[in-house]
Amino acid sequence: QAQLVESGGGLVQAGGSVRLSCAASGRTRSSSYMGWFRQAPGKEREFVAAITWSGGRTWYGDSAKGRFTISNDNARNTVYLQMNGLKPEDTAVYYCAAKLSAGIVGIPQKYDYWGQGTQVTVSS
């Protein structure tokens, strides 16, 4: 059974840090890419970062560059998103996703499996 389970969200003050985790199981572990997206109320789902299970290639959305780091632990089948220097505008539900095929990593419709999401709230 394909499953993605996120954890690590919560309430943090502006300037603080949070690390999100995404545990992958089943067919998601065979995916080409793992991605993080976020969605704030009333806004479209936004690409944050992506990584390959093998080789460690990474991509970042504009809002994440210089502040967020995506990484993975193959032994634990887990992908992480380290978020530093958080701002109130980073407040959103953060989703982990798995993409089975190669290609563009920043389009949510291209991903095959999604986690349930974890809320990150940044207070000013």
Image (cartoon, grey):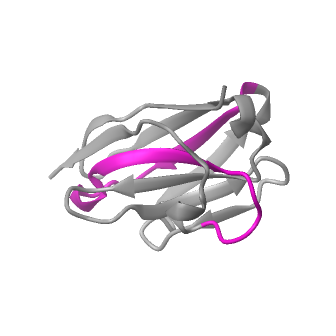
99 within the magenta span? yes
Could you say where residue 1 lies in the image, as x and y percent from the top left? 66, 25
Residue at the spot 58% in from the left edge and 41% down from the top edge: 80
Q: Is residue 61 above or below residue 80?
A: below
Q: Is residue 31 above or below residue 28?
A: below
Residue at the spot 25% in from the left edge and 61% down from the top edge: 89
Q: Is 52 displayed left or right of 46 in the figure?
A: right
48 within the magenta span? no
Q: Is 14 displayed left or right of 80 in the figure?
A: left
**Direction right: furthest residue:** 55
Query: Looking at the image, how many numbered discs can be counted on the residues?
Result: 0
Task: In this rendered view, identify the residue nearer to me: 42 or 118.
Answer: 42
Q: Is 57 displayed left or right of 48 in the figure?
A: right
- Picture quarter containing residue 59? bottom right
Residue 41 visible in the picture: yes
Task: In this rendered view, identify the residue nearer to me: 13 or 97.
Answer: 97
Could you say where residue 6 lies in the image, as x and y percent from the top left? 48, 33
- Picture quarter containing residue 117? top left
Task: In this rendered view, identify the residue nearer to me: 67 or 21.
Answer: 21
Residue at the spot 48% in from the left edge and 38% down from the top edge: 20
Residue at the spot 27% in from the left edge and 58% down from the top edge: 87
Q: What stretch is highlighted in magenta?
A: 76-105
- Picture quarter containing residue 103? bottom right
